Image (cartoon, coloured by chain):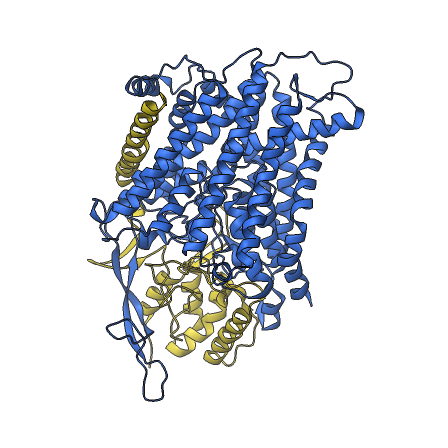
Chain colours: A blue, B yellow
């Protein structure tokens, strides 16, 4: 790794952590309903929304009502995204005249965006009209993120309240998350991106001349679409000159800003933030990758502030950061090391001040290795799934990092809201394990952790591995699952494992060689995303409801303090051990065997 | 089910705010503050638009600086469908492609035995990479000068003009903008 590479990555971590306190403190004020500097502008809009919707902002909800509200809201969102895709052919704002999306792809995409996964089976610039992108996808980018934050805030209230039957009001938390947190950050980020070259317009696609004309050879087809054969029985081909290039356009920057901030990840263009119109310069890249983890990291501070002990928030943030930095180091090392086969062929793979070096297949020169590996680790630490380089072409160990980050359950920063509530469930497991060691009833933040909470926590921990490994197993024993592989052998298995690790943890990134826009993957993936989202959110809300009713027990001599380095290590250990025990056999069949083959 | 009404109306209201007002507001501000960038960073020559500074074009004529390989289909640098190769590190197709690209570069410039910069023989993530590394430009400068029969120093000077260091001296990697460089090389002309 170059000195500059270390500096860029180091600066990223420092800026991320430095922003946790100011943004985290701001979010705590928003959720507690205190006034902020944005209130003069947004408070009237917020009140208007409550009035139109008939919501009493002071009315608390039981955890069950809160869960029903969430499910209803997300289900309606799913229906709208599905409907927009099916009807886009007859709706306005469709300058390219795209036809309706197929039913299976529409279902997959609707589930994907409602669950904050943003897995993309489709090619954005060749499938989705501007109306679908704005009214369907961009809206879900906001509200699916706000939904995750609403579940987290309910859990925090569960720890904070005592003897209460309610965990807050879903509509209020949803609205405040969207208006006060996501919207202002998105406007700022969108403008910064556009200043760097990310497009933001409603024009039709442009056509420009090529300086050097090129040509394309395509098979000749008859009227039925079947290939025409020549005298020798070979498929006939024709060569046509290409003198022009299409430049895609659209309201991209506004959508990209929220896709980064809301850990959505669904790109405006097919290659996501590798596209020069989606991520134009190293500076836009820095802000986009910062936005990936920004809210997730800051919510740790919000949590500490809201439970009245900021040390609790710092401890959780420390555990996340340790795992992140360790995995980042592995990814950077592997990608800088490059592909020995390229060196053997006569290519220079040594990084220097005039040359990116390393494994550049699937990467952009302006980002180089340091920023591509940083992004890959960050996007899978968060459940974002946006990419600025093609993970499918990473070295085996470089590709193992994003794969394993997802399999840890998206709790290292994680999705906005969902990452921290997942991590807090791991913290409950950690105090339980510690309690078993010394034979005492476990407590966390003054609440006794008992059988009910442990049952719910166990469900949260077990669902993602069951979904990931179950669907992967189904795919590798069915022809429909195997047919979509692009690479053969171990790497083909990695493509399938990656796809379900991604959808089964609501990430959305891909080893993109897999042809996932087929009925098998659209259907199984759509189910995986729905299970991974709601079968975790509902038990988490159940924990919140149960904890809110309990009294706080004063800390005694036997209480395990949960803000110390010892507990941070304990928490890291639980996260890593659960992940390793569950997934090492599968990883051994994919990236690990591939690494051994490449080293031969 | 008494949550159905707020669910429907919240979705309507938040759609108006985040799906209509937000993108329109950002478009309006962006078109006022950054009209060049918001509309695709298009390069104008007189009245004609000749390309974008941000979207690469295919070059494989020896008199031009070659762009990075592109995996878009059916032709390279197809802006309508961005794509990487998605070939895994062990793929034989990838190894063969890299070998073929190195052979093509050497065949176009037989005297040059330096190792080939990696970015020149690997496909970019987008398939539209507008840049090559300074090392990749220098590697090709001798060939471009020889074929155009102009001094290598003049070509190297153009390379230097079209090289951008790390942004703010710190972010990203140094890059050469290939399309603007080739436009400039064309202005240099070809001597007989």
Hey, which quadrant is residue A407 in on the image? top right
In this view, A397 is above or below A447? below
Of residues A418 and B61, the one nearer the viewer is A418
Of residues A507 and A275, the one nearer the viewer is A507
In this view, A263 is above or below B3? below
- Where residue A587 appears, as percent x and y from the top left, is 64, 53
Of residues A353 and A434, the one nearer the viewer is A434
Q: Is residue A85 visible?
A: yes
Q: In this view, does A23 lie to the left or right of A456?
A: left
- Where residue A37 appears, as percent x and y from the top left, is 40, 19
Quadrant for the C terminus of chain A in the image: bottom right
Hey, which quadrant is residue A83 in on the image? top left
Of residues A494 and B89, the one nearer the viewer is A494
Q: Is residue A381 left or right of residue A222?
A: right
The residue positioned farthest toward the bottom in the image shown: A231
Q: Which residue sits at x=54%, y=23%?
A: A155
Q: In this view, does B53 lie to the left or right of A306?
A: left
Q: Is residue B192 left or right of residue B161?
A: left
Q: Which residue sits at x=69%, y=36%?
A: A574
Q: Which residue sits at x=57%, y=61%?
A: A491
The residue positioned farthest toward the right in the image shown: A438
Hey, which quadrant is residue A353 in on the image? bottom right
Q: Which residue sits at x=56%, y=31%?
A: A420
Q: Is residue A181 visible?
A: no
In this view, A51 is above or below A361? above
């Amino acid at each position: 790794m170059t000195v500059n590479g270390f500096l860029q990555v180091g600066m990223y971590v420092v800026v991320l952590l430095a922003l946790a306190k100011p943004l985290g403190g701001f979010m705590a004020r928003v959720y507690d309903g205190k006034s902020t500097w944005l209130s003069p502008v947004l408070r009237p809009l917020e009140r208007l929304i409550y009035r139109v919707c008939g919501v009493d902002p002071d009315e608390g909800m039981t955890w069950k009502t809160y869960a029903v509200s969430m499910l209803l809201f997300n289900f309606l969102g799913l229906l709208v995204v599905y409907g927009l895709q099916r009807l886009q052919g007859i709706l306005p704002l469709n300058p390219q005249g795209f036809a309706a999306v197929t039913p299976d792809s529409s279902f997959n995409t609707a589930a994907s965006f409602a669950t904050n996964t943003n897995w993309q089976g489709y090619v954005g610039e060749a499938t989705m009209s501007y109306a679908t992108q704005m009214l369907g996808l961009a809206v879900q980018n906001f509200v699916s993120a706000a939904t995750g934050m609403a579940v987290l805030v309910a859990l925090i209230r569960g720890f904070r309240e005592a003897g209460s039957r309610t965990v807050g009001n879903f509509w209020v938390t949803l609205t405040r998350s969207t208006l006060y947190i996501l919207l202002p950050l998105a406007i700022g980020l969108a403008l910064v991106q556009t200043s760097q070259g990310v497009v933001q317009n409603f024009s039709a696609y442009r056509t420009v001349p090529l300086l050097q004309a090129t040509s394309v050879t395509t098979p000749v087809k008859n009227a039925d679409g079947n290939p025409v054969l020549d005298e020798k029985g070979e498929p006939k081909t024709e060569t046509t000159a290409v003198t022009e290039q299409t430049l895609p356009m659209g309201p991209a920057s506004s959508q990209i800003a929220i896709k980064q901030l809301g850990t959505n990840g669904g790109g405006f263009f097919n290659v996501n933030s590798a596209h020069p119109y989606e991520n134009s310069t190293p500076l836009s890249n820095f802000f986009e990758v910062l936005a990936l983890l920004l809210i997730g990291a800051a919510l740790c501070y919000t949590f500490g502030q809201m439970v009245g002990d900021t040390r609790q928030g710092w401890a959780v943030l420390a555990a996340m950061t340790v795992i992140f930095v360790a995995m980042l180091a592995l990814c950077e090392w592997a990608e800088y090391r490059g592909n020995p086969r390229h060196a053997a062929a006569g290519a220079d793979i040594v990084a220097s001040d005039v040359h990116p070096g390393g494994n550049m297949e699937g990467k952009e020169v302006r980002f180089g290795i340091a920023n591509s590996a940083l992004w890959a680790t960050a996007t899978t630490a968060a459940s974002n799934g946006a990419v600025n380089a093609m993970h499918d072409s990473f070295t085996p160990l470089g590709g193992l990092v994003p794969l394993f980050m997802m399999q840890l359950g998206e709790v290292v920063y994680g999705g906005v809201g969902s990452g921290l509530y997942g991590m807090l469930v791991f913290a409950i497991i950690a105090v339980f394990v510690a309690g078993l060691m010394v034979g005492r009833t476990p407590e966390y933040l003054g609440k006794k952790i008992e059988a009910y909470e442990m049952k719910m926590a166990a469900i949260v921990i077990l669902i993602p591995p069951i979904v990931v490994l179950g669907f992967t197993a189904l795919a590798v024993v069915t022809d429909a699952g195997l047919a979509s592989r692009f690479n053969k052998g171990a790497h083909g298995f990695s493509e399938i494992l990656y796809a379900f690790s991604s959808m089964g943890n609501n990430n959305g990134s891909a080893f993109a060689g897999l042809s996932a826009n087929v009925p098998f993957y659209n259907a199984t993936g759509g189910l995986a995303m729905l299970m991974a989202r709601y079968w975790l959110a509902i038990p988490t809300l159940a924990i919140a409801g149960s904890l809110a009713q309990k009294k706080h027990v004063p800390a005694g001599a036997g209480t395990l303090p949960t803000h110390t380095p010892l507990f941070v290590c304990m928490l890291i250990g639980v996260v890593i051990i659960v992940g390793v025990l569950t997934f090492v056999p599968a990883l051994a069949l994919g990236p690990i065997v591939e690494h051994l083959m490449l080293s031969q | 089910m008494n949550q159905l009404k707020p669910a429907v109306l919240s979705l309507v209201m938040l759609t108006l705010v985040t799906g209509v007002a937000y993108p329109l507001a950002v478009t309006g501000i962006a078109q006022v503050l950054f009209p060049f960038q918001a509309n695709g960073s298009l390069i104008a020559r007189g009245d004609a638009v000749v390309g974008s500074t941000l979207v690469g074009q295919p070059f494989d004529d020896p008199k031009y600086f070659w762009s990075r390989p592109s995996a878009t289909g059916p032709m390279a640098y197809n802006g309508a469908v961005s794509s990487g190769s998605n070939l895994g590190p062990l793929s034989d197709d990838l190894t063969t492609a890299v070998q073929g690209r190195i052979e093509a570069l050497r065949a176009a410039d037989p005297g040059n035995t330096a190792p080939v910069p990696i970015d020149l023989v690997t496909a970019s993530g987008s398939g539209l990479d507008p840049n090559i590394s300074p090392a990749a430009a220098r590697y090709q400068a001798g060939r471009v000068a020889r074929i155009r029969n102009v001094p290598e120093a003049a070509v190297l000077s153009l390379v230097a003009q079209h090289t951008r260091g790390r942004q703010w001296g710190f972010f990203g990697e140094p890059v050469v903008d290939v399309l603007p460089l080739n436009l400039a090389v064309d202005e240099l002309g070809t001597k007989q």
